Image (spheres, grey):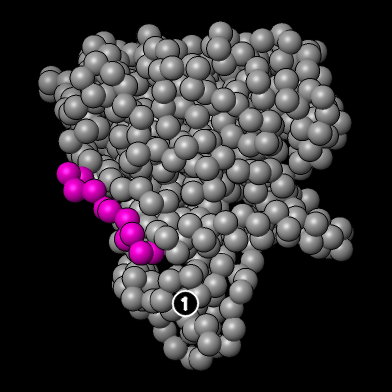
Amino acid sequence: MSAQDILIGIDAGTSVIKAVAFDVNGVQIAVASRPNTVMLGDDGAAEQDMDGTWADTAATLRTLGESVPGLAERTLALAATAQGDGTWLIDAQGRPVGPALLWLDGRSAPHARALRASAAGVQLAERTGTALNPSMQSSQLLWLREHQPDRLARAEMALHCKDWLYLCFTGERCTCPCEGVFTFGDWRRRAYDDETLALLGLADCRQLLPPLLDGTSRTAPLTAQAAQACGLRAGTPVALSVMDVPATVLGGGGVAFEGGTMRRVGCSILGSTGMHGWVSDDAARIVPSAEAGYTMLMPLRGTQARLMSHMAATLNIDWLLAWLSEAAALAGATLPPKAQLLQRLNEMVLAAIPAQAIYHPYIAENGERGPFVDSDARAQLSGFSATLGLAGTVRAVFEGICLAARDCYSALGELPPEIRLTGGAARSPALRQLLASVTGRPVRVSHREECGAAGAAICAAVGAGVLGSVRETLPTWVDRWLDPQTIMPDAQQTALYDTVFSIYRQMAAQLRPAWHALAAGRC
């Protein structure tokens, strides 16, 4: 029998599911991926087939086994992180009650808006540490109760994506303190809270909430049925990971110690969305806001992350690429491969004159959730003349992503002394430099390719007793993947961006009535 020397971390994202094999020192051995399908509706619906997500996760693990000899016998433990928020309903038999409502689903926006405007809005933010938004399970349950009561009546439990996968792996029904508490709990007590449920108007849904489980405290065995589906060994220890954001913060370097003291560093995750914030073991430094932001319990005792998310980061670059593709087709031309095109765009951005226009990157169809919540928010390019060319336009879009990051950090309070960057944008030289210059802070990049999966694998290793504690894993699993060199701000450009940022915020505030009028006109 082969020696057991592999930990598996799974990251079930909204559009892609990845399974990653690591050795016990955190070195990535292999990765397999498979698309995940989102079903979009004209009414703002964004749903996923729950059985399909499980089947694709199992298939991804089988594919991983094809590239790692003896994977089944060599696996010490596994854990799955996944997209956060959303509502994954199951019945008494553990079967899906219809498709899952994703964090992208905007149908509960009126319910979130009404609660935020009520006296309960501030109280809820203070208790949960998190501002209500349409991505959250609480507002989605309110929408289901009003629009699909029969479906809600058939549900025995409301899970999140990673919880659904854990159920499929082990047969156990639970959620992590992170998602359970920022939705329905008291973040200071790190537990569910009946007063929170009453303020939400969901006291009658208490029975839907799964038990809270710290996945670093224990594991459950992989069932025979799941083992057959995944190509793994029955009985393999499975840990419940935290959701994708804290898993990525953990795996990407957002938790830092200097001597025996936790050091405050910023962590920016720039992928399809943008998430920005910092981790603290001092509860007094956490100041919740009813306007926007999350307080997420980390898988380290007594620590929590204060985070602000904007809905679209590299989605704006995807829009640019699609626009260029249409323009090329119109001209009868063919674009170079995506990697080559992105390289050229990065070179173009770095060579372009800064701040030729101001771009607000609110391109998501369900609006914005940080540092303000407005489902009607829309992107705009402002302040340009006929002299603005392609280079200036592309640079403005890249700058807009970084201005949104600064806006999120500013809403959380003082900018951190250093920002650690992970996500797809960490590979972009232009975005790395612009993030440093726009924020005026040094940026340090994590070269780990799959930070979320690494965070999940850390949970698996600690939960299974392979490694002693989360903190013990940081030097080998996290710190050594950080670039030893920091990217420093361009002082001259930072001075310019200080002025631009003030205008950026002023314009966003003044445009909100126009967004609402446009939304009303589209109805």
Disc 1 crowd rating (10 Å Cα; few below 14, some 14-19, many 20+) is many
Residue 7 visible to the viewer: yes
Name the main secondary structure of what is drawn in magenta: loop
- Please name the residue shown 52% across and 61% down the image: 499
- Please name the residue shown 68% across and 43% down the image: 373
Vertical comparison of 444 with 398: above or below = above
- Where is residue 174 drawn, in percent x and y? 54, 15
- Where is residue 85 drawn, in percent x and y? 59, 32
- Please name the residue shown 79% across and 61% down the image: 514
Image-based side of 400 in relation to 382, left or right = left
Q: Nearer the viewer, residue 323 or 49?
A: 323
* Quadrant occupied by the C terminus: bottom right
Which region is colored magenta?
483-493
Q: Nearer the viewer, residue 482 or 71?
A: 482
Residue 50 visible to the viewer: no
Image-based side of 339 in relation to 403, left or right = left
Q: Nearer the viewer, residue 373 or 449?
A: 373
Q: Find disc 1 in the rendering and name its residue.
A: 392
- Where is residue 82 drawn, in percent x and y? 47, 34
